Structure formats: structure tokens, C-alpha cells
Image (tube, rainbow, N blue to C red):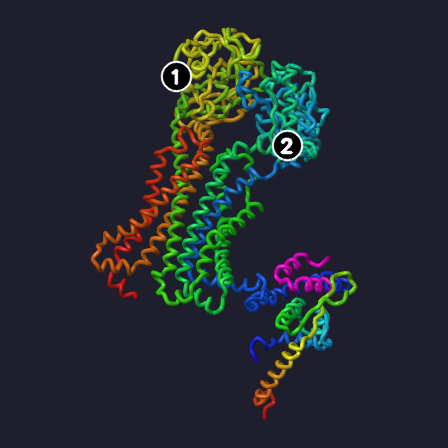
Amino acid sequence: MSRGKYLGEFEQIVLLSLARLKGEATGRRIFDELVAVTGREVAVAAVYITLARLEKKGHVRSAPGSDDGDGGRPLKVFRLEPAGAQALRDSHNELQRLWARARLHPELGGK
Amino acid sequence: MRAPRLAKLVLRMVLSADVRDEVIRDLDDRHALLRSQGPRVKAWCWYWVQTFRSIRPAMSARSRPPAPRGSRAAGLGDGLAQDLRYALRQLRRNPGMAATVTLTLALGIGANSAIFSVVSGVLLHPLPYDESENLVYLNTYFLPETGYDFAEYAVGAPEYFDYKNQNRSMEEVAAVSTEPITITAGEGDPEVIRAGWVSPSMFTVLRTPPFLGRVLVEADGGAEPANVVVLGYDFWQRRFAGDSTVVGRIVDLGMEVSEEPIPAEVVGVMPPGFHYPDPNIQLWGPLPLNPAQTWRTGHWFVMIGRLSQGVTFEQAESELADIMGRWAEDYPDHHVGHGLFVEPLLDRLVADARPALLLLQGAVGFVLLIACANVASLLLARGEGRRRDVAVRSALGAGRGRLVRQLLTESLMLGVLGGGLGLLIAWLGLDLLVALDAGTIPRVEEIGLDERVLLFTSAAVLLSTLAFGAWPALREAAIDLAAAFKESGRLSSAGRGQMRVRKIIVVTEIALSLLLVVGAGLMVRSFERLLAEDPGFQTDNLLFARFSLPAAEYTPEEAVVFFDRLVERAGNVPGVLGASLISRPPLLWDDQNGRFHIEGRPSAIEGQPCCVASRIEVGEGIHRLLGVPLQRGRLFTAEDNRPGAPGVAIIDEETARQYWPGEDAIGKRIGHSAGNTPNTVVGVVGNVTYDGPGEVFPHIYHVHNQGPPFLIRSTYLAIRSVGEPAEMTGAVRGIVRELDPGQAIAGTYTMSGIEARAVARPRFIMTLLGVFASVALVLGAVGVYGVMAHSVAQRVDEIGVRRALGAGDREVVWMVVRQSLTLAGIGVAVGLVAALMTTRVLTGFLHEVSATDPWTFVAVALAVSSVGLLASWIPARRAGRVDPMVALRQD
């Protein structure tokens, strides 16, 4: 796996949050989901910046969603792209592969 | 509490455009929700915490390597942090160069900012009045056809009322004059202050409300104005300790022109900083203005006005021209060649200083240009040493645009450093500048480092960064990879091209500094001439003390007695060589007004005096005291002082030359106004330059006692002392206290102080141009040195070969010196041509020196060439010491 395709931890968390929301959500819902699940204190901006980066990499795609009713411009809705899903799986597999070796270590469940 | 604005601003700055709006909108919504749920402070804190937490991800997103080449997705902000880091590293790696560049720029930018602060404060700042751009100044002129030639003269009441009634351009006009007044009320000794004697409309025109009480109102004015005054803030603080019960109090005003004591009621106090018409004004009273007055020859005040809404200055000016046309028809004996003119009030105040300030701003701009040229040259030289570095980065995929941007970032960092240090220099220099000026710059209180100056400095930083950084950056980034890796770093073809550019830069620098040095040289020569002017009297150890006796306390006869005693006692003080009276000390102010007529000669206008000369009332022995030589006839004697003695006058050579050419003026009779008995000319004395160094104007001396009453009460005691004249002030004060404890000296002046002030402006310009020229010369020398040193370093092996082939020390040194002399020669030649074309702008500032004075040009050309020669001396010596073995082994 090339380095460019490797997902950072926060990128994975954002993508996973998006996936939990059935692969389609606004930035604020992703943020809420992320905070709810991880309990982390996260900057709102960090989520959006990460989403923007993921979009550049082709992992998510954004489109103007339907009007949210407060009269402002419609919020962006992010969709998980197949490439994004693939990257998530790759990252997961990669980690599992690494974990498999690491389990040999006594403190990580090795025999 | 709304979402914190500052936090939002920070977010806007750090976030890139693709997420900015969405993030801020999200934060705002959450903030609103939090605010509705809990304490507002909590929401506020949450917003700030979010903002701070955003900075890191935002910055790291920006400094991430740009998107794949060719995609425009990467914004300008991307890579900025990287560029900045790289630039910092480069500067740290070469601190000597960074320091040199920063200092050079700081000098250039600092000098510019300092001068610009003055220009901005004096010329650009609006006056401290509401909608001050609508304020105008009106005064009268006399064209030569009237027999008088006054570019400017005061206004009279009929002119004031006619214009007030006939014009449609002005919302309001006002009459303004000043009077010295003796004040005894309040704390401290009696003192003579300057008062504004004005029409109440002045306060309407200037739209300044009072600080306490009220301003003068229409009902206060008129032919017999009310006895009311408004105090200036400083005067109120000083004299009445800021007591607010002063409003309603009665104060006695001692005035020269009024025979009666004037008890006046204080009706108000003006706010701090209100001084119109001049900074010394301490109080205002209503000027008597009689609408019924018809005689049009009395002129004693100036006018100001406020343009009506929507009326332009040009419209007002053309309407005035129409009105003047009508006046000329209605009053052919008075208003042909005489009438009102109008100009913007700000222009009026600063017109005098404008040319000098613009000249200095122009000159200091050249200094910055030279500084930029120097820095560009340095950066080019550095680029030479970094070719491999750039080549590596280029080979690794950095595009040309990316490289140029990075190099410009480095230049900008240098520019910002230089600008910051420059501001510090400007800040420190400003006080020095104002002190150096010695009070000839108007509106000094407006001068300071304000936003406008900061804006100017930022613009200077940006422009100079482009000026010194763009060319080197483009050169450096336009790299031929193959050549860069192949070549040894010396003697490269690109290096030679670089060298040519640097030589052109150096020639430009020399030319520019020559221009400045010529300017400074001309000013120095002019100043020498100015100081060498014969003032017509002996200037050493003279003291003048001004007196202005209130008419309410002194009849003219009593004033004569007071001054007789004063002169007598002052003359007896140990250390005093002599004492007398004079109504106008030389050089203290310029006043080329005053008219007289000659008995038996036709007048230019019926009933009006024909001739122009300033009149001066003097005591007996003043000419001997001042050392003014008697040419013909006699001086004033004690006999002339006797009451009822026949009227006499002494004229100066210039008056004799102008009005009695080839004739003896002694015995001729002259008068100053139609009704008075004429005076007989009894003597001719040498010229004294009353109006300024080198300014010859006709003057007529009259006996002090024979003058009109208000001139008798107001005069100067002149003393020549053995030692320092200022030390006599105490003795004079003591005498005054003995003669009349209620009187005050209105001011004392030493001749040396007056002289210094008289030449303050030329000295100011000369000193500053001198400083600029010196800085330019030093920078030019550094430039020559840098290029020659670099050239010698580049040619080390060539020199080695030459030496190996038998060239001696001298030949090698000469080779280098010749090269630098060629550069200096071309620079000097270009500079001389440029100077010949531009020094014309100095004409107005030069005294008895031509703007193309050949001696100055030759001397400066030689001096600049010598500096060029000196600057190449060290590199030449180094070349002379090159060891052929070492040089050749280097490869």
C-alpha cells in the first residue's frame, strides 16, 4: 500500500463516523456522531478540514444538500466513496496484519 | 453575548477557503444553541476554545505538500508556512548578510517613514475642524498697477460686509485678527498674551462647540461689540487653574489700542487644541465691525469661510472673480487691481512648508532606491552561491513558480524585518526631526506615527521587496540544471551575466547618490552664502525685550516717560554697553508692507501714498547701538525727542536708491498718511536686512516719540551687552518691576536666537539633504565594495595566472582599481546628467547659487569618484596579495 493512500487515525475516525451514518451526512452530524462515539474533545474545524482532505484524496464526495430550513445556504452533504470504503478496509486489514504479528508479544496476548 | 468577533476573525484568517464558511456557520449555530441552554460566558469560552483548537489542524493543512503538480487546488496559502520556515533557516545560516540587508533597508525605510510622518501630519491630515475640507481663507491683494505691490494684504470692514452679503457660495464667513493684551486677572504676574479678535461667526465657521459656557454669538459682535471673552483651554488651566466658576467672572483687558480699561466677562472656555488663528492665541473677543462704515482704506483683519453644502472651491473662486469684477466697476478708485482672493484653509497654513517637505520626501525616496539597489546586488551575489541548492530543489521537482515564490518569501521576510526596524528608526528620528526644524514647520502637533504612516511603511516594504527581490528571484529560479551541476561555481557564464547586472546596479547607485550629494552640496553652498550675507549691523551680544503698554494705563506721554526711564536705567546696568528703542528688531519677522508719499510727487491713485517702505520707530542712538553706518546727513538727536520738535525721518540706502536715484534725499519731505504733517529726511543710513538674510527692502526710520499713540506704547528695548545678552533679562525685569509692578515684558529675544530662527528652514533642508546624501554615499560605497570584492573573488584564478605570468602587485591592483574607476566614472557621468536635469527643483531654496553651479558639480563629481576609489581599495589590495600557487591549486 502506497503511503499516500494510508489513512491517518483521525481520518479513519471521520470516515468511520460517516460510515455509521449510512455513508451520507453533513459535517455537523459527522462531528456529533464522532463525539458521541469516541467521547473525544475535538475541534469542529478539524472535522471539516479532514473531510476536505479526504475529498481531495477521493475518499468522500460532497454535494449541496437540501435546505436545512434556517434560510442559509444548504449545508454540504458528504458521501462515502467506494475508494474511501476501500481505504478504510485497507487500513483495517493492514492493522490486522500488523496486529497478527504483534500478538506474538507476551503483553499483547502472546503465548 | 454574540459569537466573539475577534475569534471569528482569527478563524477566517487561518482556515482555508474550502472549509471556512461551513466551519464558521457550524460553530455559530452551536454557539447559539449553547447560549440558549446555559451561561453565556460558557458559550463564549467554548467558541474561543474551538478557535484555538482549529489553529493547528488549519495550519498543518495549509503547510501540507501541495497537491499534485498542475492541479490548481493548492491555494496560495499552502506551503506558506514551509516557505517561511525555509526562509528563516536561510537567514539563520547567513546572519551577516541578513543583518546587512535588514540594516540597509531599515535605514531607507526608516528615513522615508520619518519624512512621510511629517508630510502626512502637516500636509495630508485634515484640519481639526468638522468637514474641514470646506474651510477657506480670504484676504486681499494689490496688483502693481495700484502703486502698491502686495501679493497679500488685510481686509477692511466694507469689503467684509460686501462679500458676506453678495456671495452665494459660503455658508458663513468670519473676520479674524489678533491683538496683544495685558492680563492681570488670575494667578501669576501680569502677562502679555495674544488674543483672537474675531467676528462671532468664526465659531460657526469652524464649528467648534465650547468646552464650558458658550462661544461668542452674533449679538456679541457688531460696531460696538459686547465686552465678553472666551478663554483658551491652556490659558484657563494655567491662569485660572481650570476653575469652572471662571464663567461669568469679569477680567480686565489691557489693550494697546484702547484708551479705556476694558472689563470683560468670561462667557466660555474652548476645548483643548483649539487655537485658531495661531497656536499662541489664549483668548477670543469680538472684533468691532461696523456695517455702516464706507471708507474702504482701512484693512486690519483676514477672513475665513465655510463653503455651502455642494459648492466646490472652484465655484466659490469663480463667483469671487465675478464679485471682484463688479467691485472694480462700483469703486474704480479703490478696487481696480485690488480685491479679495480665496484659497483652501489647509493650503494657507501649510503652503509655505509644502515645497520643502515634498523636496525632502523626494530626496529620501532616492535613498530607499539606493538601499534597494544595494540589497538586490547582495541577493544576486548570494544567489550565485546557492545555485547548487536551487538546482537540487529544482531537480527534485520544485517548479519555477514555486522557487520564485519561495525566494520572494525570503525577500519579504527581510523586507518586513527592515521595515520593523525602520519604524523604530522613524519613531526615534521624528523627535530629532522636529527639534531640528526649530519651529518653522506648521502643525507640528499633528506629526506622529499614525495608521497612514504604517500603511505607507507597509507599502514601502512591499514595493522595495519587489524592487530588490524580484529580479534576483527570477534569475535564481531560472536555472539551467545541467550547467549548474557541471560548473565549478566560479567563472560560470551565468555568473558573468549576474556580474553585469550587479555592475549596472552599482552604476545606478553611484548616479543616484551623486544626485543627492549635488543637491546637498548646492544647499550647503547656498547656506554659506546666506550666512555670509552682510546683515548691515553688528549682530553680537544684542538683546531685545518687547513691551506693550496698555492704553488704559498709559497715555502716549506717560508711555514716553516710561520708556525714557527704562532706556536710561537699562543703559546704566553694569555690563550693558548701550540701550535704545526700536519697534522692529532685524530678522524677527518679515513685513514688506508700509506706504508713504513724497511731497510734490504725483500719486499712483489719487490721495493715496505712492511708495512702499517699511517704517520703523526708533529711539535716539539706535543706529550707533546696532552699528548701522551713517552715509549722509545726521542721526536722530535728543533734540528730535523733545515734544513738539519738527518731524524728521532717516531713510536707508535702498529707499534713497529707489526713490531719489541720482538725487540728494536730505531735506525732502515724506508722509505716511494723507492728513499727517510730512517729515523731513535728515539722514541716510546703511541697509539692514530686516526681512531675512540677504533681503533688501526700503525702510524709513522715525523718532519713537513722534509716532502714532499705539506705536509709542508698543516697542522693543534694545540692549548691547559685554557678555551673554540673555543674562541681562533679569536686570531688565528688575527695572520694569521698579518702574511699574503692573507691567510685564511681552517677550525677550537674543539676536543669536533670532538669527538661528531666520535661517532655520534652509538649515533644516540642508541638514536633512546632507544626512540623506551621506547615507546614499555610504550605501553607494558599500555597493561598489560588494561588487568589486565579489569580482575579485570570482577572478582569483585569472589573477593567479596573470601573476604566474609575471604581473606585479601594482598591475594587479591597478586592474581592479581601473575596473571600479570605470564603474564610478560611468555612474558619475550619468549622475551629472541627471543632476543637471533635476536640480532645477532646488531653485526656490537656493540663495545666490545657481542650481547648476559648476563648482559644486565638479567638487561632487570628484568626491563621489574618490569614494568609489576608496571602496575598491580593500578588494584591490586583496587581489594584489593573491598567491598564484594557492589560486591555481583551488581547482
Q: Which residues are magenta?
A: B1-29
Q: Which mark is residue B629?
A: 1
**Mark 1, chain letter?**
B
Judge by depth and name the residue closer to the eye, B250 or B531: B531
Q: Are marks 1 and 2 in contact (CB under 8 Å)?
A: no
Q: Secondary structure at mark 2?
A: helix
Of the image marks 1 and 2, the number of the one nearer the N terminus: 2
Crowding at dot 1, Cα within 10 Å, few <14 / some 14-19 / many 20+, comes out as some
Judge by depth and name the residue closer to the eye, B571 or B691: B691
Q: Residue furthest left?
A: B806
Q: Is residue A65 magenta?
A: no
Quadrant of the snapshot with the N terminus of chain B: bottom right
Q: Residue B165's x, y, as percent?
A: 70, 23
Q: Residue at x 47, y 24 (%)?
A: B691
Q: Residue B120's x, y, as percent?
A: 55, 41
Q: Is residue B215 left or right of residue A8?
A: right
On the question of residue B125 being in view, the answer is yes
Secondary structure character of the magenta stretch overall: helix
Quadrant of the snapshot with the C terminus of chain B: bottom left
Q: Which mark is residue B265?
A: none
B397 shown above or below B376: below
Q: Find residue B517 and report its image quarter.
A: top left
Q: Secondary structure at mark 1?
A: loop
Q: Which mark is residue B313?
A: 2
> Label 1 amino acid?
Pro
Q: Is residue B781 left or right of residue B804?
A: right
Q: Do the residues at discs 1 and 2 belong to one chain?
A: yes
Q: Is residue B416 left or right of residue B41?
A: left
Q: Residue B624's x, y, as percent?
A: 40, 17
On the question of residue B712 being in view, the answer is no
